Image (cartoon, coloured by chain):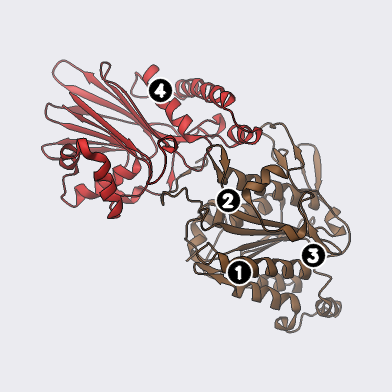
Amino acid sequence: MYDVKISRKNPALIILLIDQSHSMNEQFFSAGGKTFTIAQIAKYVADRFLYEILSRCLKGNDIYDYVDTAIIGYGTSIKSALPKVGLDEFPIPSSYLPKIFIRRNEKNSSDEEFPLPRYEWVESVANGYTSMLSAFNKAKQIIEEWIPDHRDSFPPIVLNITDGMPTDDIELVERMQNNTLGEMETLNIFTTAKKIQEMRTDNGNVLICNAHVSPEKITQIEFPNNVDNIENPFAELMFVMSSVVPKELFELGREYRFNLSEGSRFFVFNAEAKTLLNFINFGSGASLKKVDDQSGNEKLGLPEK
Amino acid sequence: MRVHHFTTPKSDESKESNQDFIGYDIKRKIFAIADGVTTSVFPEIWAKIIVNQFLENTFRDKDLSNEFLKNWLFIAIEKFSESISKLDIDQFMRDLAVDKGAATTFLGCQILDQKKTKKIRIWAIGDSNIFHINNNKIQNLFPVAKIEEFSNMTEAFSSLPEQNRSNLSVSEWEIHEGDTIVIATDAFSKWFLWASINGQKPWNKIRKNLFRMESFIKKLRFNKKINDDDTSFIYIKF
């Protein structure tokens, strides 16, 4: 499971959901004399993610369609996070990416902690409410339509970046006002996430990876395997909405210095900027590192020792 | 000394897509092989540059200082940048080449004639491998000694200076008349080692199939004895 090579015949599907609500305007991270909001870091991570797709799909002078992707922003409503792509055009193949960037930057010094991405596709938006349920429903629809033609592919991956609770799951909002989630199984967002996770290709179930970010300096929780140390109802909800990390991906997770064990969920809470970047790299790398140039013998240059 | 070499891309791929590169100078008795890292950018160009750089600027000392290696790689990196700038490619590709860089394994060696013996001095990074056969068995092998060490991860020379932190491994052996040296990229090396462990004497198989190697490799691939990857080796008989 979770081991099939990615090729043009069996591309991967990666969906990135980005919270674009008003609270994403909070200042989150400072580096090199610059301060970034949560929305700006989320945009940075998304641009890096798309550039990484391009580098994985480069073959000679062509970009091969190894990866289909969708980047969905959710504020008061859901929309495409890529200004040059309509919501209904998703997913788009990797070969489309060079045609839809919005900005090119000159190469920065490699010493910078968060250098400007070379290419930008995503606009930084922080406005309105948090229609996360609608975003997950849209992801579900994309996956439902994609899987029948890609049964042999690596399972789709959904990566969600948020700083807070959904506001479009009315039942959830009401319960949180009473400071209790009650039976999570009866919440729409929970059942939608479960339906997504029940979908599968022949190589495994769809994976949902949730990253919660917070500008407050609170202890990060990374890949927990239980909720014992989580006294936050929203965190508990995100935990159960997150997929268990398949053991086949443990080695990859350790490359990013994540401590994984049986039952670890694809979930980080109160993530700092670097953790968010590593989380998205790990989540997307689960399929991107299976890119196969038809050799069945992929090689990866080691990073620094 | 007789030298043969062979290289072939993965099945159903063009010659141009081969990311292995072989080079040698029989007169100066220097040999080199490189295997471009697939997930890097333009690895075939980088592999060729690194091998040619070794042929033009062969290492002398057994142990190389960091400073020497840094300068040696600097020349190669300049050549890589120049090669990329001349390609007829989109700005996107050019940017990817600069940002992501290329990577390649490398194994280079030199036969040193001494008074009473010959020696072979080897420098290597990554999992391209060299085998020394004497008395019909593997006498030495380097740098990979076990099959399980052939994996998806490898050290490599990078066209990005800041990525070059690993140093070369070095070895040196005595060579005698009648010995055989095989230098190969990882797919062939892995098969070679496996076949040797299983008593198949792969050096004899190479010798018998030197002039029909294409079909020999095709058969190995069909029987799944060898990974379907770019396959290259140099065979030296003393």
**Is residue B177 rendered to the left or right of residue A301?**
left
The residue under label 1 is which amino acid type? Ser
The residue under label 4 is which amino acid type? Asn
**Is residue A93 rendered to the left or right of residue B213?**
right
Q: Secondary structure at mark 4?
A: helix
The residue under label 3 is which amino acid type? Gly
- Mark toward the viewer: 2 or 4: 2
**Labels 3 & 2 near each other (Cβ < 8 A):** no
Dot 3 falls on which chain?
A: A
Q: Which mark is residue B52?
A: 4
Give x and y (percent) for residue B98.
60, 31
Chain A, chosen colour in render: brown
Q: Secondary structure at mark 3?
A: loop
Q: Which residue matches tag 3?
A: A164
Q: Is residue A184 above or below residue B195?
A: below
Q: Which residue matches tag 2?
A: A65
Dot 4 falls on which chain?
A: B
Give x and y (percent) for residue A120.
74, 43
Number of numbered markers: 4
Q: Secondary structure at mark 2?
A: loop
Give x and y (percent) for residue A183.
73, 84
Spatial CA distance of label 1 from label 4 is: 49 Å
Q: Secondary structure at mark 1?
A: loop
Q: In the rendered image, what is the letter of the chain coloured red?
A: B
Q: Residues within 10 Å of mark 4 (few under 14, many from 20)?
A: some
Q: Which residue matches tag 1?
A: A243
